[in-house]
Image (tube, rainbow, N blue to C red):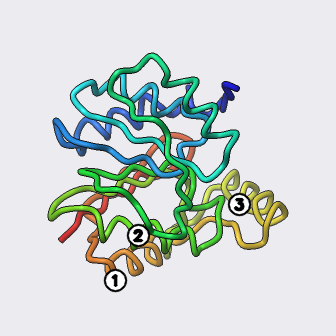
């Protein structure tokens, strides 16, 4: 049941370094689109003062998440959540790694709407992945990746930070910080205003 995503081992430490600066010391972190569950397991061990709520819409992913997190006292059983619905349980922070580009835009809009509903003032929504920025040249590797994504599903693709931020603002979320990450990725930290 346990699945493995090779990129997880490469990006988990840099992601954790930013999370250490942005997450609350205690409370519930809802992870949307937890995938294999490897990130959730790693972050739950790294941040034992937080309770982690993984989620995914895919049954195989939910089984993998449960397997990776089975021995961790601060991880709740994974929930079946489709980000596009925006129907999320209460949380003190939201984390979403590598979903925005590999899902329809409607999933991002749902993610932002859900975050706007459940987060309290100042609480973070943290996004990680490859993005485009207006006026900034995109790395050739990201261009090739986008072609692969669009071949997989024409609704997929790298989103502009500006478009995500505009949609976030409509849900009461403001971009507080953008962090350059390895392999031409970004972490975007939005906070509920």
| x and y, in percent, of residue 192 in the image | 22, 67
Which one is in front, 18 or 105?
A: 105
* Image position of 69 with respect to 137: above or below: above
Q: Residues within 10 Å of mark 3 (few under 14, many from 20)?
A: some
User: Where is mark 2, residue-wise?
Assistant: 112
Instruction: Specify the quadrant that holds the C terminus.
Output: bottom left
Q: Is residue 130 above or below residue 159?
A: above
As measured in the structure, the alpha-carbon distance from the residue carrying label 2 to the one carrying label 1 is 9 Å
Q: How many marks?
A: 3
Left or right, 50 with reference to 94:
left
Q: CA–CA distance between discs 3 and 2? A: 25 Å
Taking the spot 48% from the left edge, 71% from the top edge, the residue there is 110
Between circles 3 and 2, the one closer to the viewer is: 2
Of label 3 and label 2, which has the lower sequence position?
A: 2
Q: Residues within 10 Å of mark 1 (few under 14, many from 20)?
A: few
Q: Nearer the viewer, residue 1 or 111?
A: 1
The alpha-carbon separation of the residues under discs 3 and 1 comes to 29 Å
Q: Residue at x 80, y 57 (%)?
A: 148
Q: Secondary structure at mark 3?
A: helix
In the image, what residue occupies the spot 69% across and 67% down? 156
**Front residue of this view, candidates 113 and 46:** 113
User: Residue 31, position in %: x, y?
Assistant: 43, 46
Q: Secondary structure at mark 1?
A: loop
Q: Identify the mark at residue 155; answer none if there is no mark.
A: none
Q: What residue is disc 1 on?
A: 170
Is the Cβ of the residue at disc 2 closer than 8 Å to that at disc 1? yes
Q: Where on the picture, by quarter, is residue 169?
A: bottom left
Residue 143's tag is 3
Tell me which label, 2 or 1, sits earlier in the chain.
2
Q: Is residue 135 left or right of residue 53?
A: right
Q: Quadrant of residue 6?
A: top right
CB contact under 8 Å: marks 3 and 2: no
């Amino acid at each position: 049941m346990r699945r493995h995503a090779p990129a997880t081992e490469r990006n988990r430490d840099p992601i954790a370094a930013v999370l250490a600066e942005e997450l609350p010391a205690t409370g519930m972190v809802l992870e949307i689109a937890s995938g294999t569950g490897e990130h959730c397991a790693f972050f739950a061990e790294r941040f034992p003062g937080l309770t982690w709520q993984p989620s995914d819409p895919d049954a195989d992913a939910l089984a993998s998440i449960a397997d990776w997190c089975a021995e961790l006292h601060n991880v709740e059983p994974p929930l079946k959540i489709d980000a596009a619905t925006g129907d999320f349980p209460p949380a003190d922070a939201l984390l979403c790694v590598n979903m925005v580009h590999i899902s329809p835009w409607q999933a991002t809009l749902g993610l932002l709407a859900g975050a706007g509903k459940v987060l309290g003032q100042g609480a973070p929504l943290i996004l990680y992945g490859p993005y485009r920025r207006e006026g900034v040249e995109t790395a050739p590797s990201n261009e090739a990746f986008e072609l692969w994504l669009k071949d997989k599903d024409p609704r997929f693709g790298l989103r502009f930070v500006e478009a995500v931020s505009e949609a976030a603002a409509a849900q009461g979320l403001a971009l507080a910080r953008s962090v350059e990450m390895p392999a031409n990725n970004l972490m975007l930290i939005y906070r509920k205003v």
